[in-house]
Amino acid sequence: MNHFIKSLFIFLSLSTSCFAQSIYTSVPKKIKKSEKYMFYLHGKIIEEQGIHAVHPEYGPYEYAAILDSLNKYGYNVISEVRAKNTDENSYAEKVVKQIDTLLKAGIPAEHIFIIGASKGSAITLRVSAKAMNTKINFAILGACYEDQDLKAGKLKLCGNFLSFYETSDTWCISCVQLFKAQSCVSNFREVQLTTNKKHGVLYKPYNEWVTPLMQWANEVK
């Protein structure tokens, strides 16, 4: 085997191993204990328009590109298009059952991540309240906007949290004050975004939120 072919073989082998993780619509039948699993819960517009959703102000919701951006960092990504007008609590229970499947298969709670955007973040909060596990990781984008249960203190959250707050988003407020009274939250961090993209910052895999999200996720051992 000459040097060029040998180098090409090594490159392809490394590439295959780096991108071995996949994107699923549900928990895969074959669960690998050595890998990490990341749920992505999309915004409401995908429920209403499907995967090619387009907002009149924010443009296309790049659902597939967001999943690819999470997957390329070495995470198994689990995400499905929810039905129109999905009930937040019912869907949260579905996700909790999927989390339980991973835990029973031997996946450490620290290796499970739930990422929610807009309505997906409201579901993520309810997953946290139902799972009640301090070691599971939750990231919320555009979460603290109209969630009356959270504002009223009715949601007892639990887990390791990362929040993104876009200052130009009139629908969203900082989550800091709302999380202060959450005694089961093992850790809380908030990243303030100043992209001037309003709620549209959630519609694409912008580096402004993907990079700190992955840095945070990679810190979890």
Image (cartoon, helix red, strand yellow):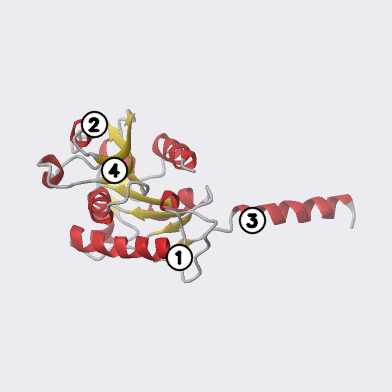
| Residue 89 seen from this side | yes
Quadrant for the N terminus in the image: bottom right
- Which numbered disc, 2 or 4, marks the residue that appears first in the sequence? 4
Q: Quadrant of residue 196?
A: top left
Asked whether 124 or 219 is in front, the reply is 219
Q: Residue drawn at (32%, 63%), measured in percent from left and top?
A: 81
The Cα atoms of the two marked residues, 4 and 1, are separated by 40 Å
- Residue 107 screen position, x and y as percent: 46, 58
Asked whether 67 or 28 is in front, the reply is 28
Q: Which residue is mark 1?
A: 105
- Residue 185 screen position, x and y as percent: 28, 41
Q: Which residue is mark 4?
A: 58
- Which numbered disc, 4 or 1, marks the residue that appears first in the sequence? 4
For discs 4 and 3, the disc positioned in front in the rendered view: 3
Q: Secondary structure at mark 1?
A: loop
- Which numbered disc, 4 or 3, marks the residue that appears first in the sequence? 3
- Which numbered disc, 3 or 2, marks the residue that appears first in the sequence? 3
Q: Secondary structure at mark 3?
A: helix
Q: Residue drawn at (23%, 60%), measured in percent from left and top?
A: 48
